[in-house]
Image (cartoon, rainbow, N blue to C red):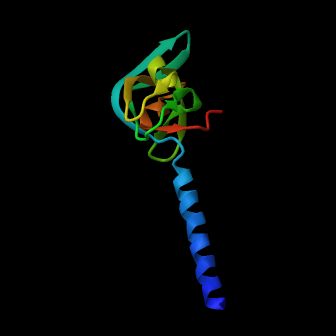
Amino acid sequence: MKRNFIIVAIATVGLCFSAATFAADQSGIAVYSTQGELKSRSSDGLNNYGKTFEVTLKNTTAKNIDLQMFCLKGYSHDGREFPVDRIDDRLAHGKLKPQGKVTGPVIFSAADDSVFDINQVKITDKCH
């Protein structure tokens, strides 16, 4: 009896861990990005630098995904995070159909050239 209880307890814990792992992939969206242009602008003593990516979002699930619930962020190799400056409306609004995809430009900018270090674009629901 005690042995059966232990087996049931282990199985229950295993199910909880697998459910937590499954829940960790909340978006169901694959992000493909290709680096585009690097730009800089100087005007009246103010500098601005920008990096463009062509981004494709692909729905990997069997359900519609509301893109307004998510945002894109750029990351450098050392973990710095950059918010989007401008984004194609198709990437930020509407519903992404099951197994569907949408492509458009995304621009990141900063007051210094650190934005040039972005090497990966990710999607998140932490948009603050």
Answer left or right for 1 relative to 25.
right
Q: Nearer the viewer, residue 115 or 25?
A: 25
Q: Nearer the viewer, residue 126 or 78?
A: 126
Residue 91 % position (x, y): 46, 24
Residue 32 % position (x, y): 36, 36
Q: Residue at 61%, 78% (x, y): give it.
A: 8
Residue 42 % position (x, y): 48, 14
Q: Residue at 61%, 89% (x, y): give it.
A: 3
User: Residue 101 lies in what quarter of the image?
Assistant: top left
User: Residue 57 lies in what quarter of the image?
Assistant: top left
Residue 83 % position (x, y): 55, 30
Answer left or right for 91 relative to 11.
left
Check the picture and name the quadrant holding the C terminus: top right
Query: Is residue 88 visible to the viewer in this orientation of the structure?
Result: no
Q: How many marks?
A: 0
Query: Is residue 2 visible to the viewer in this orientation of the structure?
Result: yes
Furthest residue in direction top, as rendered: 44
Relative to 4, say whether 34 is above or below: above
Relative to 25, say whether 122 is above or below: above
Check the picture and name the quadrant holding the N terminus: bottom right
Relative to 61, say whether 40 is above or below: above
Q: Nearer the viewer, residue 60 or 128?
A: 60
